Image (spheres, grey):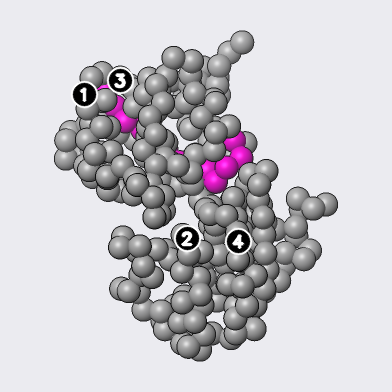
Amino acid sequence: MTSLADHPRLALPEFAAGSVWLVGAGPGDPGLLTALALHALDRADAIVHDALVDPRVLALARPGASLEFAGKRGGRPSPRQPDITARLIALARSGRRVLRLKGGDPCIFGRGGEEALALAEARVPFRIVPGISAGIGGLAYAGIPLTHRETNSAVTLVTGHSVEGTVPGGLDWEAIARGSPVIVLYMGLKHLRPIAARLIAAGRDPAEPAAVVSRVATEAQRVVVATLSEITEAAEGMETPAIVVIGEVVRLRDRLDWLAL
């Protein structure tokens, strides 16, 4: 059988020995992998993956490829970023094809830019392969479109978790509350109560619809919908990782929850 990498219509690039590919694995469902991501899984000698990569994606790795866990999860012991980057460089310099596999998209709150800069400084060849971010694909799996002509022409993507593990203090929450019709919070479940309070204090309507989507694009996906003032209580006990969306697009879920059809 002809492999994906050898398909004549795709003309996929060579995954050269001694190089690193920074690849987005999408939010969960292996069907959301790109052709380049599958190509990398088929060719990689070493796969350094984070905690959010679905096990079904890892199962697609080439037989004989080494798998190394390098996941970061809030509040738990995690590998240090400099150590992860040093490992990527060492593996590449040993002549291996190195796949740095990240959940979602590597450059949307995924530290892909940091790792790419380190690789560039070390003169290690690399490629960035975008993936479907949870804030886009995950919401689509929940029946919530990120944009709709009747509700919004702008979106703000926000991290709800600072490097110190607190609510990000360098953000202008008042400007976000006033200026964005739809707000998507990554890693925001832990601090959802104070974030919702800040948005309401800045003028956001407490009755505005909001949703939390947990374990997006997996068999364990769960969605709760409530008002902004009540979403924290409604989401109590939900598992991470989770995406939070605030805005009128949430109302469309009643008609667009295609997984329930």
- Name which residue lies at 58% across and 86% down: 205
Residues shaded magenta: 18-30
Return the disc, 3 or 2, that comes first in the chain's sequence: 3
Viewer-nearest of discs 4 and 1: 4
Viewer-nearest of discs 3 and 2: 2
Viewer-nearest of discs 2 and 4: 4
Identify residue type, mark 4.
Gly
| Mark 3–mark 2 distance (CA, rounded to whole Å) | 33 Å
- Name which residue lies at 48% across and 88% down: 201
Identify the residue under disc 2.
186
Q: Quadrant of the N terminus?
A: top right
Relative height, residue 93 to residue 254 (above, below) = above
Identify the residue under disc 3.
96
Q: Using a 10 Å C-alpha cutoff, classify the residue at mark 1 as few (fewer than 14 neighbours), some (14 to 19) or many (20 or more).
A: some
Q: Using a 10 Å C-alpha cutoff, classify the residue at mark 3 as few (fewer than 14 neighbours), some (14 to 19) or many (20 or more).
A: some
Identify residue type, mark 2.
Tyr
The image's mark for residue 237 is 4
